[in-house]
Image (tube, coloured by chain):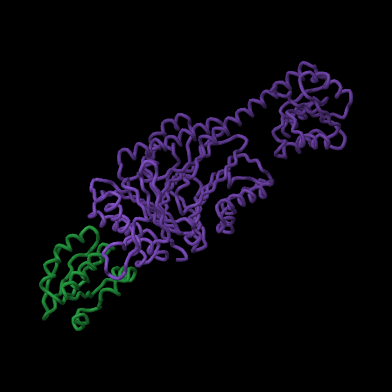
Chain colours: A green, B purple
């Protein structure tokens, strides 16, 4: 899966360059994101490409959060599309992961 | 059961004559006697005798008058009347035939002659009845089609009143697809069994042509003008041999484009009532009737229609129904009637139309067949049945999830925006993704060589999505509830399903087929 990695100071911004994060590609996402775990303590996922996430997609985001947390790091998200936000509300993801509207807000918060 | 002997009514004021006739006929027939005209008419209307022997010279009402009155009443007009009288001048006899008698016997009569004439006319009547019976059987069985029941958004009602002589009025419906159907309405010139059989032949020729044309071009249903041209070229020789022709209109109702297309071949002008404008248009083409030589191509006309519009097709028997003074019902009266009643349901319009024709003509029997077909395009608001159905079969692979969502999204595009919004469609996409991936992951245990069939149905009230698989049985108790603290990655699927759908049902049959049905309400939710 294509992930665009960008460094802004000590923050790693990961552009999730897929329009779908569902059961069909969460394993792939898990494998590809593993490289980021070791390298950074502050990670921001840019989500504005993603049009659709299902429960597996939520699951893999939670997996990432736990991985970063266990290594003493943090994971935040920004740029959710309306359809993704609907699901986040439904499964209360916003209570677990910090979600921001814009990149600036998110970066400021670290 | 043995057939009852025919009933003969003897009308005479002279006891000697009555005795003579009774003794002549009593062995072969059931007999009744009326001693004056008024009693004769009352009896005839009440008991409908098979034949009447009628004296001319009677006090108060004479035989001519009695006969005239009998012929003017629809129930009694077909009872054969034989005059029996001492008046033998030709002009008396002629007058008898003029008022509707079938025969004339002069006094003094011979018993054998009376017997012979009564027998002859009874058997003629029986033969006539039999022909009418057969012709009306043909009409019912072969000439009149049934409207398609499974096309939503239209309502159809028909009126058919066979005349005593049955002519070749016919109509039929051909379904093109769920959103499109054809209607042919026609009238064969001529009467009786020949016309009825010819009507049936034309109808079956239409079926044959439709079949042939759709075999040559499987992609596209043939255009009405092509269909009519083919029927014409196939029938022209037969029609020329029989020296007859057929007027008809072949129409197509396309409920996707809201387009009415019609090939009119000299038929009665179709009335198109436009609900929004509150006007009636009379639709007329410029083709000659089928069977007229020198015409090779037929042209069609198209008009747009919208909800609430109605189309009225009818035979000339309707507009040419006569009243007592000989005036015709007429196209104008029909149009006025439609303007007044177009907002009722087609079934009610037909009933009211029948009442109007009867009131106009003061009769319930007519010289011509009366045929009328009304097609109403239902209003969206009152139309309870928007209805769509679609099906998708996928392999049990997770990469198929995309197709499942696209299928649902496309399906939802059929549903008016007033009933479903973008957010709702997002939730439905979410739910179908969860169900499908559960089936692949759990029921099929990630085997990717299995099938899942998804059937989608929508009405005004709800969307129902049915998922069928042939994998392991699903046990809801085996699924732990979701945890929202981020400590577990899984367990959200069922929670999402339960919180996005209005109803979910799971069942498994004894052949190992699992069915999961999701329902989404479209009203009040």
Where's residue B242, x and y in %?
48, 30
- Residue B401 in view of the camera: yes
Residue at image point 48% right, 38% down:
B246
Q: Where is residue B91 in the image (x, y as percent from the top left)?
A: 76, 29
Residue B168 is left or right of residue B356, and the answer is: left
Rendered position, A23 above or below B367: below
Judge left or right: residue B72 versus residue B168: right
Q: Is A12 drawn above or below residue A17 in the view shown?
A: below
Please identify the residue farthest to the bottom as the structure is shown.
Answer: A108
Out of B57 and A90, give the one closest to the viewer: A90
> Which one is in front, A36 or B301?
A36
Q: Which residue lies furthest to the right in this view?
A: B15
Q: How far across and down, in percent of the image, does residue B171 sit?
A: 49, 41
Residue B194's place in the image compared with B455, above or below, is above
Q: In which quarter of the image is the C terminus of chain B?
A: bottom left
Q: Residue at 30% of width from left, 68% of height from top?
A: A83
Position of A72 with respect to B110 (left or right) is left
Quarter occupied by residue B102 = top right
Instruction: Compare residues B465 and B307 and report the one nearer the observer.
Output: B465
Residue at the (41%, 60%) spot, across then down: B520
Residue at image coords 21%, 75%: A76
The N terminus of chain B lies in quadrant = top right
> Hey, which quadrant is residue A81 in on the image?
bottom left
Q: Which of the 4 image quarters holds residue B511?
A: top left
* Residue B173 as seen in the image, left or right of residue B108: left
* Residue A88, x across and y down, in percent: 30, 70
> Is any atom of residue B302 visible in this view?
no
């Amino acid at each position: 899966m294509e992930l665009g990695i960008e460094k802004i100071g000590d923050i790693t911004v990961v552009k999730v360059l897929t329009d779908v994060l569902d059961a069909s590609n969460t394993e792939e996402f898990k494998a590809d994101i593993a490289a980021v775990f070791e390298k950074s303590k502050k990670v921001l996922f840019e989500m504005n490409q993603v049009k659709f996430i299902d429960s597996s997609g939520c699951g893999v985001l939670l997996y990432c959060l736990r991985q970063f947390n266990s290594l003493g790091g943090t994971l935040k998200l920004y740029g959710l599309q309306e359809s993704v936000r609907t699901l986040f509300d439904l499964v209360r993801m916003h209570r677990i992961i910090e979600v921001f509207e814009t990149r600036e807000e998110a970066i400021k918060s670290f | 059961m043995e057939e009852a002997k025919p009933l003969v009514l003897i009308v005479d004021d002279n006891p000697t004559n009555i005795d003579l006739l009774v003794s002549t006929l009593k062995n072969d027939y059931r007999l009744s006697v009326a001693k004056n005209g008024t009693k004769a008419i009352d009896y005839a209307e009440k008991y409908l005798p098979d034949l009447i022997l009628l004296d001319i010279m009677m006090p108060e009402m004479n035989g001519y008058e009695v006969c005239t009155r009998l012929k003017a009443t629809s129930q009694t007009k077909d009872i054969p009347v034989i005059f029996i009288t001492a008046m033998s001048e030709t002009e008396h006899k002629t007058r008898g035939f003029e008022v509707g008698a079938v025969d004339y016997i002069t006094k003094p009569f011979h018993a054998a002659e009376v017997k012979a004439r009564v027998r002859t006319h009874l058997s003629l009547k029986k033969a006539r009845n039999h022909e009418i019976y057969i012709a009306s059987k043909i009409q019912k069985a072969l000439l009149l089609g049934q409207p398609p029941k499974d096309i939503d958004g239209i309502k159809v009602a028909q009126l058919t009143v066979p005349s005593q002589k049955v002519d070749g009025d016919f109509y039929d419906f051909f379904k093109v697809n769920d959103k499109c159907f054809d209607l042919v309405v026609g009238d064969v010139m001529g009467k009786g069994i020949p016309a009825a059989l010819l009507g049936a032949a034309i109808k079956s020729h239409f079926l044959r042509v439709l079949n042939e044309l759709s075999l040559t071009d499987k992609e596209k249903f043939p255009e009405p003008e092509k269909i009519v041209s083919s029927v014409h070229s196939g029938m022209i020789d037969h029609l020329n041999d029989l020296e007859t022709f057929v007027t008809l209109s072949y129409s197509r109702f396309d409920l996707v484009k809201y387009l009415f297309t019609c090939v009119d071949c000299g038929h009665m002008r179709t009335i198109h009532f436009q609900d929004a404008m509150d006007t009636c248009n009379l639709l007329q083409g410029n083709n000659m009737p089928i069977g007229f030589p020198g015409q090779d191509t037929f042209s069609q006309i198209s008009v747009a229609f919208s909800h609430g519009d109605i189309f009225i097709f009818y035979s000339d028997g309707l507009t040419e129904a006569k009243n007592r003074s000989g005036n015709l019902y007429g196209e104008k009266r029909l149009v006025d009637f439609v303007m007044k009643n177009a907002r009722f349901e087609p079934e009610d319009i037909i009933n009211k139309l029948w009442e109007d024709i009867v009131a106009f003509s003061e009769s319930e029997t007519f010289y011509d067949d009366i045929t009328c077909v009304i097609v109403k395009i239902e209003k969206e608001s009152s139309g309870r049945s928007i209805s769509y159905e679609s099906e998708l079969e996928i392999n049990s692979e997770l990469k198929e999830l995309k197709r499942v969502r696209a299928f649902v999204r496309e399906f939802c595009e059929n549903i008016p925006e007033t009933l479903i919004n973008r957010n709702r469609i997002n939730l439905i996409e979410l739910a179908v993704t969860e169900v499908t991936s559960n089936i692949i992951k759990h029921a099929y245990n990630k085997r990717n060589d299995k099938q899942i069939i998804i059937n989608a149905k929508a009405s005004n009230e709800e969307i129902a999505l049915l998922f069928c698989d042939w994998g392991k049985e699903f046990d809801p108790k085996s699924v732990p509830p979701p945890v929202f603290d981020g400590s577990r990655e899984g367990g959200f699927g069922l929670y999402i399903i339960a919180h996005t759908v209005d109803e979910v049902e799971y069942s498994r049959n004894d052949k190992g087929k699992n069915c999961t049905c999701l329902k989404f309400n479209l009203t009040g939710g």
